[in-house]
Amino acid sequence: MNMKVNRMKKFGLIAVLGAGSLTSCVGDSNSPGLEYMPDMYRSSAVEAYVDYGEVRGKYDENAQNLIVEKFTFTPPSGTIPYAGNGNVAVNMPYRHGAPVGADKTHGLYGVRQDSAGLANAKWDVNPVPFSEDVLKEGKVLFERFCIHCHGENGAGDGTVPGTGKYPPPPAYDGPLKDRTAGEIFYTITYGKGAMGSHASQINKEERWKIVYYVQKLQGNDPGAATVVVNEEAAPEVEGGADAHNGH
Amino acid sequence: MKVLNSFISQRFKLLVVTAISLLSFSSNIYAEGDKAKGEVLFKANCGACHFPHKDMTGPALKGARQRWIDNSSEENFYKWIKDSQKLIGEGDSYASSLFNEWGSVMTPQAVSDEQIDDIFAYVDGYEDVTPPPPPTGGPGGTDVAEESSNAIWWIIAVLLLIVIGAVGTVRGNLNRVAKVEAGEAVNENETLAQGARRWAWDNRGWFGVTMLLVVVALLTAGMLDLMKIGVFEDYKPEQPIAYSHKLHAGDLAIDCKYCHNAVTKSKHATIPTVNVCMNCHKTVTEGTTTGTEEIAKIHDAAGWDADTKSFTGVTKPIKWVKVHNLPDHVYFNHSQHVEVGGVDCAQCHGDMKKETVARVMTTADLNAVEENKIKFSRPTLTMGWCIECHQLSNVDVAGSHIDGASESEDSYYGVIHQRLMKDKETYQKYLEDDVISVAELGGWECAKCHY
């Protein structure tokens, strides 16, 4: 009989301790919870965002250095793929350098600078052929990347300037009405004044699509703009000829 | 004549005095402009580069007119605004000193003199109305409260045990005294353990039942806890910067994809690099709840020197702690779900617009979001969770078909899907209910997720 009671007590004790220790780990929001044997959540290969090179409490120095090098300011170059649609003009590297001093004003470290960049970019032709679908895509992208500063109609009344802590951008159909497609592209790529460079977030094809939508908000005809610009400069750019025939 | 003259000059003086005192009501003695008009003009033309009360791309404009009067002339003040480069060309020393100090060109402004007066009526009357940060609060406050309440429960439990023990001993001693007085035999050498055993045996009926209940209850609790092994629900680690989704994605209505911009293109949604924060935090240097403290950490990481207003080139990574993490033996791809499958973030990540830093949502949180069509019963981020959703989600086979396209022109998947829909005999088993779930297209095959 003694034996029986004894066993029961031990059992009870184990159950109490077990349950207690389990709940105590799980309740902490800073701990991911319990793991039954290491289940490859932490691998010794460096995985994006995981532990920054820590393997079972130890840091591998090489991995650390790699991470400091790679994960710092902007995504590693080449992480935003060239648009894979075979449109050569879109895929070509952007010819115009950043404004002088862009490393100091906009943190564009290591980007080629060119005092004539903006002036040369002015008459660039939009290499993405215009269509209503492209304009629609541009609208979606504008609503993702620009709307919270520039506002729904580009009047500079987005939610972020609405806080009073961020400067309201000028209205597209006001002071910015005469900005050409090339200038708009240049601004998205390198930023201007308070506006930062958005090149790390938006690839070139997407930027050109947004340009069409901005032109619409300027009150200009985005389809027509291609032609006007086309007559003045760079007729050899691909896509321009098609657009010309269309009008 | 003299009298008349002095009379006029008297009245003139009076007029000037009243005018000045009237104007100084609007705390501005120069401009006779209209504040309301000025505010609109300021925001439309100057707001991109100037704040009234602090420096930005250009200097704070409050008191600028006085600075010009002191250093140059009021006439040049108007000239500057209309074309600053021209004035510099004319050799005005204050203008060129300004240009040298600020280093960037103020674009010529198409405004009239009256409009400038309106603008400065607004600017000089501007009061900074940023509310001061509340004294308490900040991140971590609630956690501390929770922890201490946990500790209180433990203390109460220990106190209860002590009380029970004390009462038990007293009662045992009393019993013994009673027995001795009644002349019954008392085993003086009985140890505590023997006593307890005897007591249990004497009361074996209800003691056995209680013990059984206790053991069953503990085992159930233990089992439930064991089920949580490998389940990371509610994991919400502290982050290096007290960034808030509620503020940015909720109040400021910034699209999730502005920051997590690779989500439509790649496996990873990506955590925004610090340059994305700097798109706004170059100018937004102060938050409502944390003041400059947290935002200074962003500046530190980006190498932004808030005093000289320039990037120094010395950068540091921000070590965000990864919250959602699948084991290495699973392949999960965001673009497959978000771009191809059209699944909304909230279906898997819940309502992030109400959260501060990210948390692994529980099944209950996910089901609480009204727009979520799929209601889960399995814990988030487990295999059961993926599988359940693949059974309940349908693939939009019609959507991949280009309207009006013939088979040769259709998209790659459009062709396959059209064949599926037409050839009912071969694919009958999929089409019994006229919908094709992800599971039926292979979403349950081990190798789709494990390879």
Image (cartoon, coloured by chain):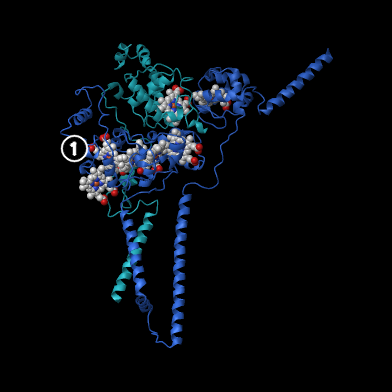
Residue corresponding to mark 1? B429
User: Which of A77/A28 is in front?
Assistant: A28
Occupied quadrant, residue B185: bottom left
Q: Residue at x 46, y 73 (%)?
A: B167
Residue B139 in the figure: left or right of residue B446: right
Q: Residue at x 44, y 72 (%)?
A: B165
Residue A143 x %, y %: 40, 28
Residue B71 x %, y %: 62, 25
Dot 1: chain letter: B
User: Which of B263/A50 is in front?
Assistant: B263
The N terminus of chain A sits in image quarter:
bottom left
Q: Which chain is cyan?
A: A
For label 1, count other residues whose C-alpha is less than 10 Å away and answer few (under 14), some (14-19) or many (20+).
few
Q: Residue at x 35, y 11 (%)?
A: A231
User: Which of B257/B42 is in front?
Assistant: B257
Occupied quadrant, residue A3: bottom left
Task: Relative to B92, say whether B449 is above or below.
Answer: below
Residue B404 x %, y %: 25, 21
Which amino acid, mark 1? Lys
Q: Which chain is blue?
A: B
The C terminus of chain A sits in image quarter:
top left
Q: Secondary structure at mark 1?
A: helix
| Residue sitting at the far bottom | B183
Task: Relative to B375, say whether B122 is above or below.
Answer: above
Residue B298 in view, yes or no: no
